Amino acid sequence: MKKKNLCGLGLLCVALAASACTIGDVEERAEVSMTTSTDVDPRPTLSGQTMVPDADAKGDGGKSDKDPAPAAARGNVQEALQKIVEDVQSKYGGKAGIAVAGQDEVYSAGISEPRAAWSTSKVPVAIAAERAGSADPSMISQAITFSDNAAAENLWQSLGGGQSAASAASAVLAEAGLDVQVQPTVTRPGFSAFGQTQWTVADQARFIGQLGCIAQGSGVLTAMAASDPAQSYGLGSLDNSSFKGGWGPDTNGAYEARQMGTVELNGKKVAVAIYATSPSGAYGSAQQMLSALATELAGAKVQWPKAAC
């Protein structure tokens, strides 16, 4: 896995603050043509960045790592997450959320209500298309690694679009134990239907923790693990991360940014989801908040729970 570096966020924040109301189609504009998958939407590039190609384990004494964590350990995890959110919100203002999922438990702090999934919803759509045999590896790579909206829309339409596609993607989420319904129709003109699926950080962490056990998701996992230099912030700033990000303006025009994925901490794969929106509403500021959440997660002196799969 290539090491992913974070750089130049300050310059990006200044550049984007003046245009926060006009970059709504950076990632999430819906594509309606089945023939425009090569028309990649502009992706955020951090200032100064050079674009380049791109069986259950047993612990000590034979104790299964599926055993529930002691109460003290659970408390430490929850306290650590709460501190992370408080630190980030104290520094940047705005709202933040974070969740980690273990074998049978999910811990979360900060904003807990469902928010628009944006391009993170491309993950269940891509898995459903891979199962249906309607997605080739290059299309999945474009939709997942590079968040190409046209490629994602092609995957959606290959499932029949509308309720047919939504049901197929929702079935993927159900396999992870989630009762999350993928949005079947466009609710905000100019944005994809599935991107407006409402998803909590807790449920995203749970889904990511189960993703390795979901059938026919290998192509999507490979694409999530690939490195896109334009997204080397947040979870992308950590070594050995595998994630999908999403971003877009809320109904008031303030940018939301979120990521879900796995990171390696203390030799353990940890399933995590993060969310941020800044007081200024600028996308660059939300990026900075995601990076702060990821940095504090990696630096916390806590034994994070191991992902289920």
Image (cartoon, rainbow, N blue to C red):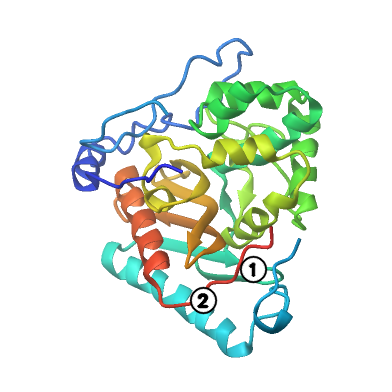
> Splitting the image into 4 quarters, where does residue 87 fall?
bottom left
Residue 181 in the image, given as x and y percentages of width and height: 74, 47
The reply to whether callout 1 and callout 2 are in contact (CB within 8 Å) is no
Q: Earlier in the sequence, mark 1 or mark 2?
A: 1
Residue located farthest toward the front when viewing the structure as drawn:
61
State the residue at coordinates (67%, 33%): 126
- The residue under label 1 is 102
Q: Secondary structure at mark 2?
A: loop
Of circles 1 and 2, which is in front? 2
Residue located farthest toward the top when viewing the structure as drawn:
35
- The residue under label 2 is 303
Near-viewer residue (33 or 8): 8
Residue 48 in the image, given as x and y percentages of width and height: 20, 36
Query: Amino acid type of disc 1?
Result: Gly
Query: Amino acid type of disc 2?
Result: Gln
Residue 162 in the image, given as x and y percentages of width and height: 74, 29
* 10 Å crowding of disc 1: few (<14), some (14-19), many (20+): many
State the residue at coordinates (51%, 26%): 148
Q: Secondary structure at mark 1?
A: loop
- The quarter of the rendered structure image containing the C terminus is bottom right
> Splitting the image into 4 quarters, where does residue 11 fall?
top left
Residue 2 visible in the shown view? yes
Residue 125 visible in the shown view? no
Q: Is residue 246 left or right of residue 305?
A: left
How much space separates mark 1 and mark 2, taking CA atoms? Answer: 11 Å
State the residue at coordinates (78%, 43%): 215
